């Protein structure tokens, strides 16, 4: 009897231990309002030529509260699409993870607001604030929850309304032209088949102020907290040292992709689809050439949406998958770099 119980238990343990998380559905939503480079050059000292040459971006979407309502409402649209494509309902979901640095409120985060929009039960909700790496960090957390057997189905969201955080004056022109709004959602499910093979996460906090929004943090001095100073809203806008971000990004992207490949005894030529965080087309092209990947093995949509921070990877993944560019058995590599600095990668057997 004792032996039988042991066999049953060790079988269950083995099963649990070998559990993978698989992305079974993806969805995305972007605001209706298209803002072209020419539109921006009417309000900023910039041009389509400058933006296209430096970033690859042709247009982006800007949120309109009259149309989209809120980030949580936009996320609901993307979540409904992901659930439908996954063949699941909101009642199948055990946990929600929402990556955003532009949530509806300073607190609580957008995960609970999405839970409310979807009329979900009292399942746990978690917010992640790792900017452009937020989706990879979220995916990694979800993967651990599934691997340990704690949850079976997790909704992972990356969503941003960056247009409210950019400085749309000449002073902010080098950052204002880069960012856009949108939401992407992935449904992760426990599976005995391979799925997420590994995730790799890194950070280097000494560069925190090279790409950041200062307010409404608690770092204001006593003087800065005086009522007349509160009216100084410059700290609410994105500050970015573009050159510094660029130099670190190209190194870290390549490093963290190679780390993932090495851990899995794979090489760059095994990658069927690379989806880099859509930071800048020049950065994506640089990584592509370093890894020696042909155009058809890399997906970019920054031309249409700009840099949507935590939303960029799930939107791109949802589009690439929807267009049939990712097939069963493909090796998919996701990688991101951004504020913190933080960076990470995920290697997935589809
Ligand atoms: N339109 C026209 N001119 C602009 C401009 C704009 N929107 N923004 C800046 N410029 C000007 C600058 O004033 C400067 O002019 P000067 O030479 O007369 O002084 C010139 O263009 C070059 O500015 P610089 O900031 O050195 O440009 P850059 O080549 O570094 O490109 C970025 C700027 C932001 C596009 C680039 O640094 C970049 O892509 N960085 C990475 C950003 C990124 O990926 N961020 C996302 C993080 S995940």
Image (tube, rainbow, N blue to C red):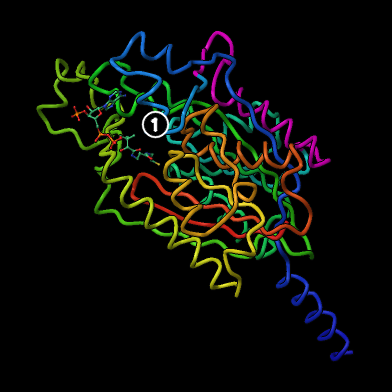
Q: Is residue 245 magenta-colored?
A: no
Q: Position of residue 28 (x, y in %)?
A: 65, 32
Span shown in magenta: 62-90
Relative to residue 101, is residue 241 drawn left or right? left
Is 147 situated above or below 175? below
Q: Give the quadrant of residue 155.
A: top right
Ligand 1, what quadrant?
Answer: top left
Residue at image mark 1: 53
Front-most of residues 51 and 146: 51
- Image spot of residue 240 (x, y percent): 28, 36
Provide residue 303's location: percent of width, then percent of height: 52, 30
Residue 111, horizontal then vertical, whole percent: 56, 36
The answer to whether residue 39 is above or below residue 190 is: above
Please identify the dominant SS of the magenta region: helix
* Residue 89 falls left or right of residue 220: right
Where 180 falls versus 133 (above or below)? above
Please say whether residue 83 is one of the residues in the magenta stretch. yes
Quarter placement of the C terminus: bottom right
Please tell me in which quadrant of the rendered image residue 209 appears.
Answer: top left
Front-most of residues 194 and 14: 194
Q: Number of callouts in the render?
A: 1
Q: Secondary structure at mark 1?
A: helix
Estimate how packed mark 1 is, as few (under 14), some (14 to 19) or many (20 or more) residues with alpha carbons within 10 Å.
few
Q: Outermost residue toward the left?
A: 223
The answer to which of 124 and 199 lies nearer the viewer is: 199
Residue under the image location 63 percent in, 51 percent down: 297
- Residue 152, quarter of picture: bottom right
């Amino acid at each position: 009897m004792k032996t039988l119980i042991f066999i049953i238990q060790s079988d269950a343990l083995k099963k649990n231990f070998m559990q993978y998380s698989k992305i079974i559905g993806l969805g995305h939503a972007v605001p209706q309002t298209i803002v072209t480079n020419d539109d921006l050059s009417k309000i900023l000292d910039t041009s389509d030529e400058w933006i296209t040459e430096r970033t690859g971006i042709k247009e982006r979407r800007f949120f309109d509260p009259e149309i989209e309502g809120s980030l949580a409402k936009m996320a609901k649209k993307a979540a409904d699409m992901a659930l439908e494509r996954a063949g699941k309902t909101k009642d199948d979901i055990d946990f929600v993870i929402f990556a955003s640095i532009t949530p509806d409120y300073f607190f609580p985060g957008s995960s609970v607001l999405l839970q409310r929009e979807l009329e979900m039960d009292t399942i746990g909700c978690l917010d992640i604030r790792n900017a452009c790496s937020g989706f990879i960090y979220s995916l990694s957390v979800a993967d651990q929850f599934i691997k340990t057997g704690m949850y079976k189905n997790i909704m992972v969201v990356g969503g941003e309304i960056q247009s409210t955080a950019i400085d749309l004056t000449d002073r902010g022109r080098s950052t204002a032209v880069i960012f856009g709004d949108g939401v992407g959602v992935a449904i992760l499910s426990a599976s005995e088949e391979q799925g997420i093979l590994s995730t790799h996460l890194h950070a280097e906090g000494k560069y925190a102020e090279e790409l950041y929004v200062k307010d409404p943090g608690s770092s204001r001095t006593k003087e800065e907290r005086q009522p007349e100073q509160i009216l100084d809203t410059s700290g609410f806008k994105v500050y970015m040292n573009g050159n510094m971000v660029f130099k670190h990004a190209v190194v870290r992207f390549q490093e963290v992709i190679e780390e993932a490949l090495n851990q899995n005894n794979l090489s760059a030529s095994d990658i069927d689809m690379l989806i880099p965080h859509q930071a800048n087309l020049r950065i994506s092209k640089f990584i592509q050439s370093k890894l020696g990947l042909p155009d058809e093995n890399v997906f970019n949509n920054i031309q249409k949406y700009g840099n949507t921070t935590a939303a960029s990877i799930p939107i791109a993944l949802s589009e690439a998958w929807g267009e049939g560019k990712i097939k069963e058995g493909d090796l998919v590599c996701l990688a991101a770099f951004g504020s913190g600095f933080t960076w990470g990668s995920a290697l997935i057997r589809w």
